[in-house]
Image: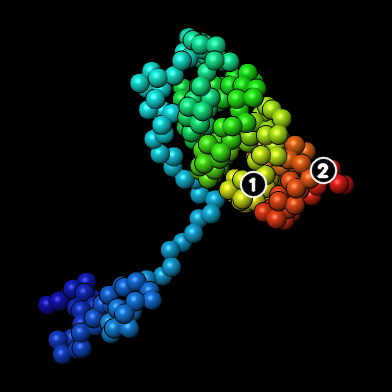
Amino acid sequence: MVNGKEFRLTLQKPLANAPQIRKHRLVPAFTVQAMQRGTSVLPPPKCYPFREQPSRCTNFKMNYSRGEFPLTLEPNKTSVTWKVDLSKLDYHHYLPLFFEGLCETEEPYKFISQQGIHDMLTHGGKKIYPCIPQLIIPLKNALNTKNRQVMCATLKVLQHLVKSGDMIGEALVPYYRQILPVLNMFKEKNVNCGDGIDYSQMRGENLADIINETLEILEQYGGEDAFINIKYIIPTYESCIIN
């Protein structure tokens, strides 16, 4: 006797004389294999344009771990103390390294890099302008992480950089095509909280607001060609000077 369960299991098995069904082999698209029998083309990979990109180990973290920076973190972890006079610091060496630290999300590297940059920009004077070409790739890498906290901190550093000396804003105009495209993706990404309260806006951490503020500062300090170059990359931007 065969019970009902065993009978149902036999129905799921193919017949002995039934033709065997071959499984299709997955192959890449636009190749010779895609024209072979018994193959199926792999679907295109999914694109996640707003997904955060993990940051790699930076030179800033390596140098700080080896104690190669002339500064120390205070015990209260709210300030740093420089061991040398900032006016005598080699900006060509240290400023690009600190800008690489903008990608850091781990403490204390995150705080030290940001605080060190602001201190150097405040006291740098004429030493900052020659270092601008070395700062573009670290700025681009930090913005391309698409981490909102990293992007907010990087944009605030960019604002400080533009205001830190004469002609710096104009010197950044040729590099807009490298640092601004990612901002076009997040420019309109405001937080929609309905009737609630957006506390990030109160703390100055709303990414879309910081992007608009940064673009306005770039236009104000970038000279007569700044608006055209910003508009070319971010079509939705409206001038804060012309209007």
Mark 1, residue position: 174
Kindly report which numbered mark, 1 or 2, lies closer to the viewer in this rendering. 1
What label sits on residue 11 in the rendered view? none
Q: How is the image coloured?
A: rainbow
Q: Is residue 35 above or below residue 126?
A: below
Q: Is residue 11 left or right of residue 216?
A: left
Per the image, label 2 sits on a secondary structure element best described as loop
First in residue order: circle 1 vs circle 2: 1
Badge 1 density bin: few <14, some 14–19, many ≥20, Cα 10 Å: few
Q: Position of residue 227 (x, y in %)?
A: 76, 48
Q: Is residue 243 left or right of residue 33?
A: right
Badge 2 density bin: few <14, some 14–19, many ≥20, Cα 10 Å: few
Q: Position of residue 104 (x, y in %)?
A: 47, 32
Identify which residue, 187 or 25, lies in the foreground: 187
Q: Is residue 39 above or below residue 77?
A: below
- Residue drawn 61% across the image and 21% down it: 124
Q: Position of residue 203 (x, y in %)?
A: 68, 29
Q: Amino acid at mark 2?
A: Cys
Q: Amino acid at mark 1?
A: Pro
Q: Is residue 12 above or below residue 122?
A: below
Per the image, label 1 sits on a secondary structure element best described as helix
Mark 2, residue position: 240
Identify which residue, 23 or 203, lies in the foreground: 203
- Residue drawn 61% across the image and 28% down it: 128
Q: Position of residue 239 (x, y in %)?
A: 80, 47
Which quadrant would residue 135 be assigned to in this image? top right
Q: CA distance from mark 1 to mark 2?
A: 20 Å
In this view, which residue lies farthest toward the left? 1
- Residue drawn 56% across the image and 38% down it: 133
